[in-house]
Image: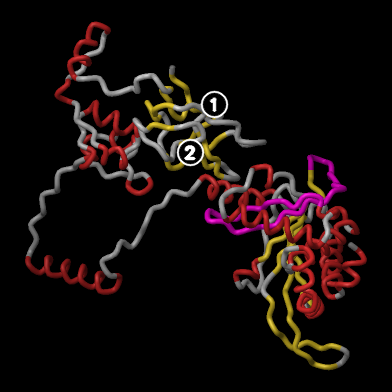
Amino acid sequence: MATNVVVPGLGESVVEATVGDWNVKVGDVVSVGDLLVELQTDKVDLEVTADVAGTISEIVKATDEDVEIGDTLAIIAESGDAPATAKPAAEESHSANTGETVEAAKRTTITESSRSVASPVARRIAAEQGIDLAEVSGSGRGGKVMKSDVTSPPEKQAAPAATPTPQTAPAQQRDSAATSALAEIFGNQEREERVKMSRRRRTIAKNLVQAQQTAAMLTTFQEVDMHSVMELRTRRKAWFEEKFGTRLGFMSFFVKAAVTALKEYPTLNAEIDGDHMVLKKYYDIGIAVGAEEGLVVPVVRNADQLSFAGIEKKIRELGKAARDGKLEIADMMGGTFTITNGGVFGSMLSTPILNAPQVGILGMHNIVQRPVVVDGEVVVRPIMYLAMSYDHRIVDGNTAVRFLYRVKELIEDPEDLMLAG
């Protein structure tokens, strides 16, 4: 009995994925729960495992192919069944009475080494057409030979070397001199590399362009004195970590400040639906996290109901999952407002792009010691620049400015922040 390995449900609003690297090949014996392949979606990577024990008899979808929910990825011949193998030449010839005509002379043997450098579809076509895979340049990841590499016109597969045009000795010398000059400047390494964008990177690109094209996006700026927060963290960090088992970071202060300010300026905790504003009375704060394939925004649910420790623990949990590639699609759905911290990478100032359909995003930046005037005296203080981008369609400029100033007030007076929270 054969079992199809199919694309599972991918989560809310996700209907398509891209096949990643296969962890198995045809002929491999697998057990229940063994990892077969990873699927790349717009949000996260999903692992597809074996539901039955048996032998991989066919890999239907190759790496980098786009698939939809329900598509067959591979076929497993369950334990006790004979795995599918290539038919001998005699058996192929005997199948002529069913209408097939196969010339055994046109088939080539596929070695184990060619299996690792070619997709299953490319191997099948190469075998049928008598193409030596060792002579085909692969366009897939890591030089893997794909279907298009073996189905392109023969002249493209192995174009004969062009007959050199006779040149005069001076012309040849000029060409040689130019080549030597370029090699001296750039070296002999390849000067360009063509890399296909991952599905997630393509989605990020599409969403960012869409956000700029559909929203009336503006940004307002403010500076905040981090002295009080830093002094409080230094004084209480040991106690906090011992009591709650997590470090006291800056992000929990900004999440608390943002939630307090959102309650006072509710149009920033909203989205636009046609001619309506949807004002949200819950506070699911997205925290932008840099992952290997691009920015992801996991969500801290009901942040208004969490303590400082609860926020810190959740942020660290989500951040680790993002870096390890273990985020679930549900972790990134439905945020109401986003905070991004470019300061961890050294950014001094930036204009963050809205995380649609949200209408507000707060950008934090690095902390720099700067001279400021306090009570008529010039002192050196740790200053951070804040940026707040907003959708001017429903958020007025004075609302955005007052919101950001309220965040500044709360950060500069942590006791007020704790009482407000």
Q: Residue at x 14, y 24 (%)?
A: 105
Q: Residue at x 50, y 31 (%)?
A: 32
Region in magenta = 273-302
Question: Is 339 on the left-hand or right-hand side of 266?
Answer: left
Q: Earlier in the sequence, mark 1 or mark 2?
A: 2
Q: In x, y percent, where is residue 320?
A: 62, 56
Q: In x, y percent, where is residue 129?
A: 22, 28
The amino acid type found where label 2 is placed reads Leu
Q: Residue at x 60, y 35 (%)?
A: 10
Q: Tag on residue 35?
A: 2
Q: In x, y percent, where is residue 54?
A: 42, 26
Q: In x, y percent, where is residue 265?
A: 88, 58
- For mark 1, give the secondary structure: loop
Question: Is 331 on the left-hand or right-hand side of 51?
Answer: right
Residue that badge 1 annotates: 70
- For mark 2, give the secondary structure: strand
Q: Tag on residue 290?
A: none
Q: Quadrant of residue 319?
A: bottom right
Question: Is 402 on the left-hand or right-hand side of 325?
Answer: right
Q: Could you say which is closer to the camera, residue 290 or residue 113?
A: 113
Q: Could you say which is closer to the camera, residue 323 or residue 31?
A: 31
Q: Is residue 292 magenta?
A: yes
Q: Which quarter shows the N terminus?
A: top left
The amino acid type found where label 1 is placed reads Gly
123 vs 219: above or below: above
